[in-house]
Image: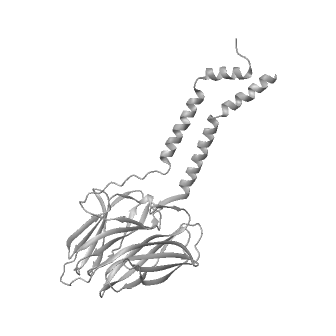
Amino acid sequence: MGLVSMGFRVSIKSKKSPLLFFIGFFISISLVLTFSSGCFEKQGGVFREYEEIFIQDVDVMSTPQGEGALLTVTPYIRNDQNTDSSMLSVKVKIIDQETRLIVAEKDLDMGYIKARSLAYNSVSLGVADPGDYEVEVQLFKEGQLLDSGGRFVTIKTETFADQPADILLTDMNLVITQFTDRDAKVVVDISPGVYNQGGDSKALTMVITARTDPYTAYTESDELGIVKGSSRLRGHVRFVLLRRDEYTFSVTVEENGREIVTSEVPEPIKMDQIERQVTKNYPLMEEGMPVEAPEKEDTPGFEGSIVFAALLLTACVMHRKDPKSKKDGNEELYGWRRR
């Protein structure tokens, strides 16, 4: 009975190892990876934890002012927490890229931001000379630094009045402000950016088209008026669109009724994938230009998972390989052999 009892215990251990160990380890790693992927998202090349307060975007518009320009800086602050924020403030700095000196600086109160919502405010700062500048924005909560971000801008020398306008469409901001008709429709604010790198323009009109198919399109327009040389601004229109559809957006600028530039968002936008009060920024590509396919991002740990799966499969095969030799070996260990 002693030999049988010892043999029973040894055989149980041989079944648990190594297969059960590898399976348990694999499940643990999978749970950790799943949990991590739910807690972090990639924004701007770094991993950002959910449920925090951060700078979602910084918008910079410029208006010529003497030799320099007046910069209007609008930071968009997102509160992803389930509770309202504490008192928030923003510090805006204009830094000369050549000398690294701060040429202008202002503080801006953001107040309290409600849970799961977006807030923004604007401040204007003057730059006396043309050149390349960095607009740095810092977000504070009760004096503690939470986040920072910014943009780079170039202030050009003053253009001559008789120089023709040279209008560029830079990007497009999109934000869903509310759901209507039992959440079947969305109210969408569209704000394309315009940059005049030439002389003063004549009266400009911006026309935005949201298209679902070759036969269905929605069009809105905004009168921009005269846009001075070397200045930036944003048009603004509002659409009411079906939430379940996807749309391609195109933007056209007309000068005294003559079309001078047309650009479009490279890919269709699915409205049901955009959260309410979250500002989305899209590049505008000149119509007819080829769109480069985005590079595929490597999934963190994907190659390691493949290697681990291969090791697990190898362990399973080795565990099941040549059962006869295992049996003979156990008989040697217990001191008896089947006759």
**Measured from the top left, where is residue 166 in percent x and y?**
23, 74
The residue furthest left is: 162
In this view, 159 is above or below 85: below
For the rendered model, the colour scheme is: one colour
The residue nearer to you, when weighing 330 against 36, is 330
Q: Quadrant of residue 135?
A: bottom left
Judge left or right: residue 13 versus residue 118.
right
Q: Quadrant of the N terminus?
A: top right
Judge left or right: residue 62 versus residue 90.
left
- The residue under the point 25% across, 66% down is 262
**Measured from the top left, where is residue 104 in percent x and y?**
42, 84
The residue nearer to you, when weighing 3 against 250, is 3
The residue nearer to you, when weighing 49 against 171, is 49
- The residue under the point 70% across, 20% down is 332
Q: Quadrant of the C terminus?
A: top right
**Measured from the top left, where is residue 13 in percent x and y?**
70, 32
